[in-house]
Image (tube, grey):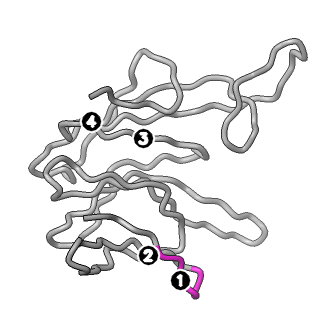
Amino acid sequence: QAAMVKFNTDRTRSLFLVTNQGTQKELLRQTGSIVSARFDPTRKFLYCLLTDLNIQGDLYREDPYLAVIDLKTGKKFPLVSLPDQRDVQFSLAPDGLAVLFDQVTQTAVTDSHQTPVRDSSGKPIAASRLWLLPLDPIAPAANPRPESLPLAGLKPRWLP
């Protein structure tokens, strides 16, 4: 199986589940972005980092959130909203029992002698936190609560 993104002519994006037998199933269609997706170890669920597109006059904003898609039913369940997070990264544990994600705070550069760490848009990062989202492997949409870890970090990854 593979998860693939299709850019539609109506400015939406679709996420498809494609099998090695050539079967294609559209899992979702949305106006926001499909940033990344990871299968759980059982291949029953697909964890996604998605964004909702909000346009209010001249203001254009994408609000990211983590969601899970039940591959059997095709239903999407939002897990946690990540407001004001432009450059979020997430990592699914190899056993499928938790998700790590980061939270970045941007800043203006005040000291010209220091070269700050920058996000993907080039803005300086003031601080970052890591979060752990425990998951129920049987019912991952069962309203999990993220826990702040006492670690700073960017682009978290689980080690095998």
Q: Amino acid at mark 4?
A: Ala
Q: Amino acid at mark 3?
A: Phe
Q: Residues within 10 Å of mark 3 (few under 14, many from 20)?
A: many
Which stretch did the figure color magenta?
6-11
Seen at 42% across and 15% down, the residue is 150
Residue topped by disc 4: 93
Q: Any mark on residue 14, and which?
A: 2
Q: Any mark on residue 90, and which?
A: 3
Closer-to-camera residue (119/4): 4
Residue topped by disc 1: 8
View extreme (right): residue? 112
Note whether 56 is above or below 104 in the view shown. below
Q: Are marks 2 and 1 in contact (CB under 8 Å)?
A: yes
Note whether 138 is above or below 109 in the view shown. below
Task: Calculate the distance from the C-alpha at mark 3 to the C-alpha at mark 2.
Answer: 20 Å
View extreme (bottom): residue? 9
Dividing the picture into quadrants, the one containing residue 130 is top left
- Precedes in sequence: disc 4 or disc 1: 1
